[in-house]
Amino acid sequence: MPSYVIYARKSTESEDRQVLSIPSQIRELERIAAREGIPVAEVLTESRSAKAPGRPVFSELFRRVAAGKVGGILCWKLDRLARNHLDTGTILQALAEGKLERIVTSDGVTTSNGNDRFMGLIQLGAATKFIDDLRANVKRGVRARAERGWMGGRPPLGYRNDPATKTIVKDPERFDLVRRMWDLLLSGTMRPEEIRCSANEEWGLRTPRLKRKGGNPLCRSLLYRMFANPFYMGMIGRQVGWTQIGAHPPMVTREEFDRVQEILDRPGRARSQKYRHAYTGLLRCGTCGCSVTAEVHFKPSGRRYTYYRCTHNKRHVPCAEAAVSEPELQAQIHRSLQRLEIPESALTFLNRRIERTLEGERARRAQVRATLNEAVDGLRREEQNLLSLRLRDLVDDATFLERRNALQGRRQALEARLEGRRMDSEAVGSLVARTLEFSSRVALLFAEGTTVQQRSVLEAVGLNCTLRGRKVALEFKNPFRMVAEAGSCRNWCSVVDDVRTWIEDRTEYFALPEWFIKEQKRTVPNLS
């Protein structure tokens, strides 16, 4: 004979905050079953939202109803069974076909009778309408919050929601530590996995503790999601591609964020797990374009040898490139870096030229700064005018949002340039001097440096490094390319102006290795 079952469900979401807990529902339904003399064969429970189809316990229950194994259901309310149209149709169809005799709730009994099914349809429709209204209200609230520059939900690591002001503020316990992780990745002194281990073991960094989770060390996936999240550079609007400027304080600049993506976004990049190699992930095969990986071999004597070879990941591209030993590879890179060396006499001449250049630079930079300020003020006026038009209903919402986002994007780009130009002439001159000093010593620093230092040197100056025929082809990034071109013809007169102009107008990330800056603070002329 078909049996009766108790079905109790509670979601953890907001629409169920006033609903009885599952044990309370079961107790009430057992009382109803005892009062009505209904034999209960089984109790089914589920902690899932009913706003969308796909609940496994509900699906299994109605599979048994269709097979004639369940004749009746006891539940607290009909909305415990369904809050979406598909499940509503499943319930009503089972009643109409007589496969389900009745549904007993605290409000009454729903049978296969047409009047009962009609009243059940109204109750289930009201439950679905409640979800639809709730969804619309939540989306409207998220849009209104986003228009004010605030992201909905829980912010990423380093930030927290302020319940008093309903804004996003810096997390005083974690903001500086997370910024330190960005700095370490940008400096090139540590790899992401090493940064994660330091944060967990040395700094004691933990995720925020919540009601049911949190307080855990950082996992690898969280670290990479953090470094790829545009929220840290001040952007919100995940649904529309992170195009809107947020009102929260950014942790990194757009330039720093783009540099991190360049460091991490290397398809097929080799990441050694057992050994720490200087050049894995920096070289590509010149024949097939695959990454170059490192292999460690041990001789019977116990001596260790490291070879670099193509990974041959592109099976459809024939590649017969031979491996090259690490000492030979190192020697070739060292010879390439020697092209950046600047003679001592030329370096002294360049430092004097930097000092003379600073004198006429202040007036020009002030004029450029004034021009940028004027352009930013003009964009702010346009935003105010656009807002006035919207308040008078002269433009619709779609046009207003599209135009406002475009104006904000242009203003942010100009403000970023203006922020970059806040570096005064003396600071620019000091950076030019340090760059030329680094270039003059780069080959020696590479030859005498540790594995981490050698890697950071190659990342700082190298571009499109390829290995073909056991030979390394190495291009130089700017501004080191300018130094190499000037050194090839011994034309040092214009290199100071070229490097200074590039540093002022650069659009990509540029930084000397942090360990070199600390070492040279007392040796490089202090022009600031």
Image (tube, rainbow, N blue to C red):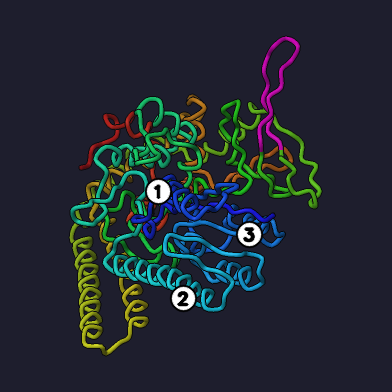
Point out the tag, 1 or 3, that comes first from the N-terminus: 1
- Asked if residue 444 lies in the magenta stretch, the reply is no
Mark 2 or mark 1, earlier in chain: 1
The one of 303 and 404 positioned closer to us in this rendering = 404
> Are dots 2 and 1 in contact, CB under 8 Å?
no
Residue 193, percent across and down? 49, 34
Residue identifier under label 3: 71
Q: Mark 3 or 2 closer to N-term?
A: 3
Looking at the rendering, in which quadrant would you find the N terminus? bottom right
Q: Nearer the viewer, residue 179 or 50?
A: 50
Instruction: Give the residues in magenta.
Output: 293-309
Q: Which mark is residue 21?
A: 1
Which of the numbered marks, if any, corresponds to residue 122?
2
* Residue type at the position of mark 1: Ser
Image coordinates for residue 164, horizontal then vertical, percent: 18, 53
| Depth order, front residue of 477/70 | 70
Tag 3: residue type?
Answer: Gly
* Amino acid type, residue under disc 2 in the picture: Ile
- Residue 307 lies left or right of residue 512; in this view the side is right
Instruction: Name the secondary structure under disc 3.
Output: strand
Q: Residue 512 sits in which quadrant? A: top left
> Can you give x and y, in whole percent of width and height, for residue 406 in the image?
35, 74
Up/down of 298 relative to 466, above or below: above
CA gap between label 2 and label 1 equals: 25 Å
Would residue 247 be found to the left or right of residue 111 on screen? left
Q: Is residue 130 above or below residue 299?
A: below
- Location of residue 372 with respect to 504 vertically, above or below: below
Q: Residues within 10 Å of mark 3 (few under 14, many from 20)?
A: many
Residue at 46% x, 42% y: name it.
Answer: 222
